[in-house]
Image (cartoon, rainbow, N blue to C red):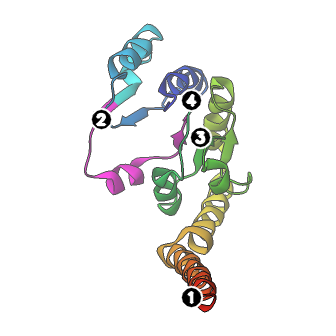
Amino acid sequence: YKGHNFLVSAFKKVKSEVPSAQLLLVGEGPFKQDIQQQAATAGIDQSVHFLGQRNDIPELLRAMDVFVLPSIGSEGMPRVLLEAMAAGIPCIGTSVGGTPELLCNSDIGYLVPPRDADALAKGMITLACAPEQELKGLVERARERIRTHFSHDVVAKKLGSMYEAEIGHCCRKDKRLTSGA
């Protein structure tokens, strides 16, 4: 459900437009050999790097020019996308799960349909070739969105409000039960 096969297909198109491009895949999974074979068959295996499980994600994020989350299945609220946006990396994600809530407009990042290698490639090429000033603005707006909607403080306040509302609801319900006895 991570959509790496679509990412590799998209990356082949990216390599034809941006020959210096490199693709970093972080993590492990049962389809690693299939993805390695796909990259070899496409002739891009020398530019696709399988990094495995890593504990140095902040350093890896700093080395990236573009972050892509090509999910095709449910994603919930993808923490990795939050981290990439907060780290100041232009992001591309597919319109599944909570990703559209994060990449809600093109001023923040690129949102593409799932299973669409052409759209992924177009987004990657666009961001790879975008003027520095344009990327800087995109990154600043993405960071601001994270700060105002998804920071630890904001999430804690939202959770606190939800708990308080539920406690108030339970207390009112308990009063009705006890006052009628």
**Residue topped by disc 1:** 178
Q: Amino acid at mark 1?
A: Thr
- Asked if the stretch drawn in magenta spans residue 83, the answer is no
Q: Earlier in the sequence, mark 4 or mark 3?
A: 4
**Residue topped by disc 4:** 18
For label 1, count other residues whose C-alpha is less than 10 Å away and answer few (under 14), some (14-19) or many (20+): few
> x, y percentage for residue 50?
32, 30
| Span colored in magenta | 50-71
Q: Is residue 79 left or right of residue 140?
A: left
Q: Are marks 4 and 3 in contact (CB under 8 Å)?
A: yes
Q: Label 3: state its secondary structure.
A: helix
Instruction: Name the image quarter holding residue 162.
Output: bottom right
Quarter of the C terminus within the rendering: bottom right
Instruction: Name the image quarter holding residue 44.
Output: top left
For this rendering, which residue is in front, 38 or 124? 38
Name the mark on residue 51.
Answer: 2
Q: Are marks 4 and 1 in contact (CB under 8 Å)?
A: no
**Residue topped by disc 3:** 128
Separation of disc 4 and disc 1 at Cα? 71 Å
Which residue of the protein is positioned furthest toward the bottom in this rendering?
179
